[in-house]
Image (cartoon, grey):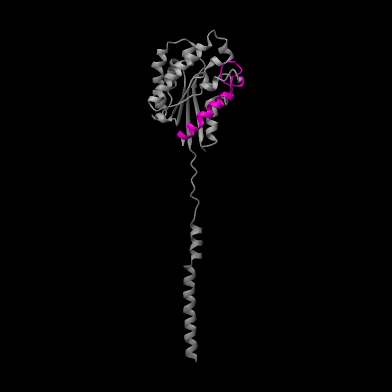
Amino acid sequence: MKKIAFLCFICLITFGACSNSDDNNSPYNNQMNDDDNDTDSTNIDVESLKILALGDSYTIGQSVCETCRFPVQLKDSIATTIEADISVEIIAQTGWTTSNLINAINTSNPSSDYDLVTLLIGVNNQYQHKPFSLYEAEFPMLMEKAIQFANGDKNNVIVVSIPDYAYTPFGQGNSDSQQISSDIDQYNTFAKSYCDERNIVFVNITDITRLGLEQPNLVASDGLHPSELAYSKFVGRLLPIAIEKLQ
């Protein structure tokens, strides 16, 4: 009987050792070990986007607030869709012709790493009665520069049509407002044709400005330039294209 009891005691010790070994290798213990070694490896990378807007009074936003001009409205609208640190640089002044813009670009020498570049130029060529041949020669030069600034990618460039100031109180005071519209059409037709031939995006906003007489709130307080509301309508057409390009 003593021998049998001794053998039972040995078995109990052996079984207990095996049970402890199994517990150490149990899925629960493995999970606990994995949790203990787990660290938060999430890396939040804040993307940055750069926009360059080239132009004249329509780009700098004559007679509207700084946040009302279309490049800034566009930036703010993009920010509601794309989480990024977005900056916008504007090279534009009231009264600038294509020649003035070229000179300003050469002076400021922008970098070539912009994610999006807009170009709106030509109204002062028309207003100052410059020969149309000057626009024909200098618009392509500005397009080349815009593409260069856009990482050398024409797909990152948007050309915006020239507004028609004939449909403003100032334009109506002109002796021949119909000629203004005809001239603007000539400039826009050339720019659109140039862009279409090279598969560059051209966005027409001229029709919006031609509502200026029947919808006076589309004209700024100076009676000549687009209002904040008009610029918001520009952005309504630009935004989907910009989002597609930036994404």
Which residue sits furthest top? 175
Judged by its main secondary structure, the magenta piece is: helix
Q: Which residues are magenta?
A: 216-245
The vertical placement of 129 against 43, above or below, is: above
On screen, residue 191 versus residue 79, left or right, reads left
**In front of the other: 191 or 115:** 191
Q: How many marks?
A: 0
Q: Pick the residue in front: 204 or 50.
A: 204
Vertical order, 163 against 30 (above or below): above
Please tell me in which quadrant of the rendered image residue 215 appears.
top right
Q: Is residue 222 magenta?
A: yes
Residue 205 percent location from the top left of the image = 51, 23
Question: Is 147 contained in the magenta span?
Answer: no
Give the camera-side residue of 2 and 219: 219
Q: Is residue 129 left or right of residue 220?
A: left
Query: Looking at this view, is 63 or 109 the one in front?
Result: 63
Residue 148 image position (x, y, % from top left): 39, 26
**Image point 49% across, 90% down: which residue?**
2
Q: Residue furthest bottom?
A: 1
| Picture quadrant where residue 149 is located | top left
Where residue 109 appears, as percent x and y from the top left, is 42, 23
Relative horizontal placement of residue 176, taking residue 140 as reference (left or right): right
- Residue at (49, 70) in percent of width and height: 23
What x and y, as percent, mark residue 207? Answer: 52, 22
